[in-house]
Structures are given as structure tokens and as C-alpha cells.
Amino acid sequence: MAVVLAVLAGIVLTALGPATVTGLLPYFTIQSNVAVGVLAGYAAWCALRDRPEPPSALKGAVTLYITITGTVYHLVLANPASPFAMAQPDRQPGEWWGNQFLHTVVPLLAVADWALFDRRGRLRPRYAAWWLVFPLGYLGFALVRGLIVDRYPYPFIDAGELGYDGVAVSAVGFATVFWLLGLLFVGVDRLLARAGRTGPATAPATPGAVEPPAAAGPAEPPVVRRETTGSA
């Protein structure tokens, strides 16, 4: 439930600033956070009802999306050295905390929850490609919306500034990174599964301990030799 509370706190605190809830919805940040909150709430409901938890492939996908949110924000949007850096406004304390919840706290909690509590060994390399469906769908949504409102949520998909050729190059680059990140999730899942199955075959001996002698089997009866006296 900590993830659900963090998502709610992030959205509510961010909405206290100039942005409204409806104005926040077109952002990948909000959509990925909402997906994390809904999945975490559903998983908690399943646990209370003693029902099967959500599929690992779905949880892996949502965890990847929120990881993308945190990674892109810190390395691309809020990084002054990035060519796609966005000017960071002066935020009031509540709005500042909301921004941190959405881009830092929730991604960290989601990744920790996936690493510690998800079932292991169920992810496959092909999932990394399927997980790109939502980011690519979001790209199409953002471009169509941009044609209507003449505004784009992120500079690396701003067709007005980059042109569609520039957006295509940017999209291919980001999609490749996201695919590799998905493969990293699959690899970590396999490593954790292998570590969970690995254990010592026998208990290690205590230094200085003397092993008890092997139990002796039943003693064989003694062989009795009898001399026979032959008749003349």
C-alpha cells in the first residue's frame, strides 16, 4: 500500500501547483504512476481475497514503465547536460514534493517491490519487445494530440521543433534503450531465480568437530569348526 499512497500523494501535491489533474493526464509520468498505483491496489486486493496475484509479465511491464519515468526525468529532462533538458521551474514545497514522489519515490518503491516480492523465473526475453507497445502507443497519442493543441509534453517528441524526421530518430533511440532496459529486467529476474534455487548440498562441517563413527552393522555369528572322526 505504500506505493499506492506515494502515487496519490504525488498526484495531489503536484496538482496543488499551476497544473490541474486533467492537464497532467497527457504526461507519461502520470500515466505510468497511475498504472503502478492501480496494479499495487489490485495486488493488495488479491492478497486479501486469497486470489492469484497479477501476472509477472504485467508487473514487469508496469515496473519498466515507471523505471522509464524516473530514468528519463533524472538523466534527460532534469539534466542540464542533456540536449532535451527542460527548464525546471521554482516550485512551492508541496509541488516540489509531488514532483519527487512521481519521479523518484514511486519508481524506487516499484522496483524494490518487483525485486523483493514478485515471483521469479517467469519473464522471457520476448517480453522486452512486447513491453514497447505502450510507449509506442503513447508516442502516437502525443503526436496526434500535438497536432490538435499544438503542444507536446516532452521536447524529444516535439514535432514542431524537431520535425517528424527528428522525432522518428529520437523515438528509435529511446525505443532501443527501453528494449535493452526490458532485457535487463528479464536478466535480473533469471539471476534472482537462479540465486533462489541455489543452496549448499550438505551442511558445512563445524571446524574442530569430530565426526561420529559410522554405525556398525550387525555382528556376524562366529564360525564354529567341528572335527569329524571317521570310522576305520
Image (cartoon, rainbow, N blue to C red):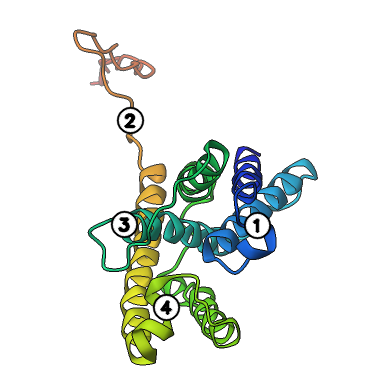
**Residue extending furthest toward the right:** 49
> Label 1 amino acid?
Pro
Mark 2–mark 1 Cα distance, whole angstroms, equals 36 Å
* Nearer to us in this view, 88 or 175: 88
Q: Secondary structure at mark 1?
A: loop
Q: Secondary structure at mark 4?
A: helix
Q: Earlier in the sequence, mark 1 or mark 4?
A: 1
> Label 2 amino acid?
Thr
Mark 3–mark 4 Cα distance, whole angstroms, equals 16 Å
Query: Label 1, on which residue?
Result: 54
Q: Earlier in the sequence, mark 3 or mark 2?
A: 3
Query: Label 4, on which residue?
Result: 157
> Label 3 amino acid?
Leu
Query: Label 3, on which residue?
Result: 75
Percent coordinates x, y for residue 155 in the rendering? 39, 72
Query: Label 2, on which residue?
Result: 202
Percent coordinates x, y for residue 84 in the rendering? 32, 68
